[in-house]
Image (cartoon, rainbow, N blue to C red):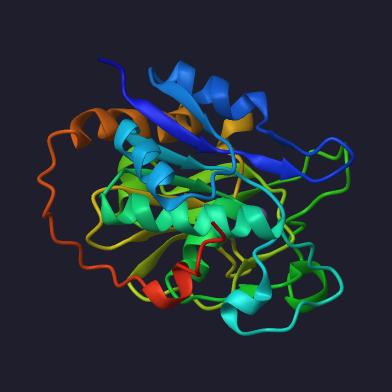
Amino acid sequence: MKPIIGINCDYEDDTKPHSFVYRDYVDAILMAGGIPFLLPLVKNRDDMECLLERMDGLLLTGGDDVPPSRYGEERREKTHCVHADKDVFDNLLLQLALERKKPILALCYGAQLVNVAYGGSLIQDVPSEAKTAITHKPAKGEKCSHSVSIEKNTILYKIIGADVLNTNSAHHQAVKKLGKGLKATARTSDGIIEAFECEGHPFLVAVQWHPERLTFDTRHAALFKALVDTSSVGRALPANTQLSGKIITGQICPTPRL
Ligand code: MN
């Protein structure tokens, strides 16, 4: 049976509030042999646990910014937070997925969400706060790419099979302090962390770029293949598998609004 991969939706709170996800994410999972399963905002914890039971893996998508209050900072001018309901949903979703050792691929905002959940912090605006000659968020329509250097002996290296990879880049925030239990696995030459994983977790791979837009390149498509393949295997993982990563549960799980 093909594994079911949950995909957290983005949320637009306009005159017709709606959950949505860009098709690239869905197609990337389909291409990799998984069944995409879109997750709208659900506020009831029991309902979310039911959703989790039916998912074999989780894809955390890109989006707006993590509220800086989660890492003890004031929101700065250029920070545009995700909707408060999405913030609560995403954090609870992540916590429940981690408790169940579900394989997780986290992209862009998804990666930042994971870092903050593990007690890390973020550079709120790379162009204005970090000294770098690299354009991490090019102007609209401009195809700016940079390369990343990948650490050997990491899950990411096993997936990509190379120590240098060209990527796209569409982020204005980045990891400042890496969360406890997380390990940087790729950086740009300016030192910005472009990928990390959780030591001891069977499959928690986070990247700062958008591989879902690059699936014509087998190395980027391999990230989704690895998620789907690990999710197939994951069904057999014993429920009491011990993880060495330390999750800061106080921060990751605010009281859900029921
Ligand atoms: Mn970048």
Residue pictured at 20% horizontal, 62% vertical: 243
What x and y, as percent, mark residue 73?
67, 84
Where residue 24 sits: x, y (%)?
63, 26
Q: Quadrant of the N terminus?
A: top left
Residue 109 vs residue 142: left or right? left
Q: Is residue 230 above or below residue 183?
A: above
Q: Quadrant of residue 210?
A: top right
Residue 114 point in image, percent of width and height: 48, 61
| Viewer-side residue, 143 vs 257 | 257
- Left or right, 195 with reference to 102: right
Name above or below for residue 25 compared with residue 247.
above
The picture quadrant for ligand 1 comes to bottom right
Q: Is 30 above or below relative to 84? A: above
Identify the image quadrant of the C terminus.
bottom right
* Residue 144, x across and y down, in percent: 77, 44
Q: Nearer the viewer, residue 249 or 33?
A: 249
